[in-house]
Image (cartoon, rainbow, N blue to C red):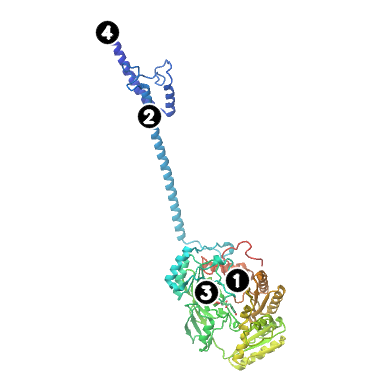
Amino acid sequence: MIHHQLGRKAGLVAAQARDTSRRVASLSDTLSVLSPSALTAHRTFASKPPTPSTSTTSASTSPPPRRPVAGTSGANADGRSFRGQMLESISSRMAREQAERQRIASERQNSASTRNAATTFMLFCVGVACYYLGTKMPQDPSPDSTLPLGATRPPRHRTNAAELEAAWADFVAIVGATNVSTAPTDIASHVSSDWSSHKTTDEKAAQPFCVVYPSSTDEVSRILKICHTRRIPVIGFSGGTSLEGNFAPTRGGIVIDFARHMDRLLTLHKDDLDAVVQPGLGWETLNELLQEQGLFFPPDPGPGAQIGGMIGTGCSGTNAYRYGTMRDWVLSLTVVLADGTVVKTRQRPRKSSAGYDLTRLIIGSEGTLGLVTEATLKLAVRPTETSVAVAAFPDIRAAASCAARVVGEGIPVAAIEVLDDAQMACINAAGSTTRRWAEAPTLMFKFAGSSARAVREQIDAVQAAAKAARSVSFDFANSPEEQAELWSARKEALWSAIATKQPGERVWTGDVAVPISRLPDAIEEVQADLRRVGLRGTIVGHVGDGNFHAILVYAPEQRPAAEEFVHRMVKRAVELEGTVTGEHGVGLVKRDYLPHELSEETVAMMRKIKAALDPLCLLNCDKVVRMQKPKAGEIGEW
Ligand SMILES: Cc1cc2nc3c(=O)[nH]c(=O)nc-3n(C[C@H](O)[C@H](O)[C@H](O)COP(=O)(O)OP(=O)(O)OC[C@H]3O[C@@H](n4cnc5c(N)ncnc54)[C@H](O)[C@@H]3O)c2cc1C
């Protein structure tokens, strides 16, 4: 009986043990889905001693189950309790799940940043592609007829060493290494001269990298194509005699010199009275070549000037009164534009009304619109009879009045030149002429005609006009030798003024022109101003055209006084309805006077033309018109 009762008890215990085992499995499953906070709560609960409870339905409130192992009180073989093992299992499972959740979160985050980067890159590529396509699309043209200074953008050139060195190799491939020079002496002789009035302010930054000597239009075109692609500034150079800083570099780059290889008379059309020449041919050499043909080319600027530069400045000289200026003696031009395009402005007829006058647009543009590589020039028949006369006057007003009288009476003289008393004294001091001159205001006349009688009539008419203007002497030449001697004073004018320079002194030749009737006032005022400020200077000029020059010799510390003097002279000429330059061109400084002579709108129209033909401002940038707003205080008061 007892045995039977024990057997029933043992069966009951075994059944309870199986039931407990099922509950633990169920509890373990339940805990596996608990949140970490619930688990923590559970762990807290589990570590506390069990508290009595009346409820048997909640696993969390039940006493911890024990593994029913015979002979032990809930501990397994390695000494850990069942509850301990269960918690360890739960926490390791929770740790695995947490690690898994972290992995998924981090993967999600990584893939989000990758997505962001990809989107940004894609948008960037689309932007670049749109920009590129935009540059290929035709732009809406500016609706404005002019380009005011305020609407300009600063030119962007590439003059870093790497770009210039790469360009150097390109130039060598075109013209050969001997025709690309970086020698400091070559550079120095292409940036300024003793007679140029203006130097670049920042000479170091503006130094050109090299001088290139081309031989043909095609070579010039290829050189300009390289400069255009590489954004390198270019300055054309012929005789280097210009006076207004016309070829002074302002932005580095290169100089193209036409004198070495492009100096030939290509074709003479004697019957048509024209000649095709290269830009490096000097006007004096041309006249020597034409002499035996009985022809001559009238424009006569400084000794050493060449056709390219004469076209650049729109020069004239002593013959302009009778024959006109360079603008009247060029029929056609071959021009290489800023991007290397070659154009010919017209053919050879003496006249044409076909389209815009591009020939005259280029003349006087100082190499800012294109480089001249060939010119067809008109020629004149050399007069058979010539003579020269010299008249001295008591004062400069009397001399100027005589010039105005000769012009007003229509006496067909070839030239009328004025030299003031200071200039005559310079010529005597220099001793470069065979004769000693009266140191008084002097007029020099050239006569030309088809017969000795015609010339003699001109001389008589001029002598009468001189007498009426109170001349104190009147001499004329009876032979070619006497002519040369009398005219030599005029030829030596600038050189004799330069000869008076002390070491360190500089020369400034200021040039203006006024209507002929205003000439006596203009010259007299300038001379009085010169004496008032105490500068050393002389006055010479082509007074038949109302054009005269003040040649100043000044020490460096007198530069501000010289600048103010020239400024007043220019301003006065404009007030007298004259021009800021009669023949030397605008160059570096007179560009700021142009709006006062012509108006802002006229200059803005010139700027528009420049921007149309040379949008990158590669050709002699900063000359004639400004293409970039000046810095504060850069332009003085008018
Ligand atoms: C003693 C003396 C007397 C002078 N007397 C006079 C005078 O009576 N009348 C007068 O008008 N001038 C006179 N001048 C100034 C000078 O002689 C002229 O300005 C002349 O026209 C300059 O010619 P150039 O060959 O020396 O030109 P450069 O000085 O070489 O260049 C002049 C300008 O033309 C540009 N240029 C050069 N070659 C080309 C080209 N192939 N294509 C396009 N642009 C080019 C240059 O970049 C520069 O802007 C005198 C100068 C001196 C020193």
Is 82 positioned to the left or the right of 481 in the image? left
The answer to the question of whether label 3 and label 1 lie on touching residues, with beta carbons closer than 8 A, is no
In the image, what residue type sits under mark 3? Phe
What residue is pinned by disc 1?
198
In the image, what residue type sits under mark 2? Ser
What residue is pinned by disc 2?
92
**Tag 3: Cα neighbours inside 10 Å, few (<14), some, or many (≥20)?**
many
What is the secondary structure assignment of the residue under circle 1? loop
What residue is pinned by disc 3?
237
Whole-angstrom CA distance, mark 1 to mark 2, is 90 Å
Whole-angstrom CA distance, mark 4 to mark 1, is 136 Å
Foreground residue among 214 and 76: 76
Q: Earlier in the sequence, mark 2 or mark 4?
A: 4
Q: Earlier in the sequence, mark 3 or mark 1?
A: 1
Whole-angstrom CA distance, mark 2 to mark 4, is 46 Å
The residue at the far front in this view is 503
What is the secondary structure assignment of the residue under circle 2? helix
- The mark found on residue 3 in the picture is 4
Q: Earlier in the sequence, mark 4 or mark 3?
A: 4
User: Mark 3 near ligand 1 (CB under 8 Å)?
Assistant: yes
Is 14 positioned to the left or the right of 417 in the image? left
- The mark found on residue 58 in the picture is none
Q: Position of residue 344 (x, y in %)?
A: 48, 75
In the image, what residue type sits under mark 4? His
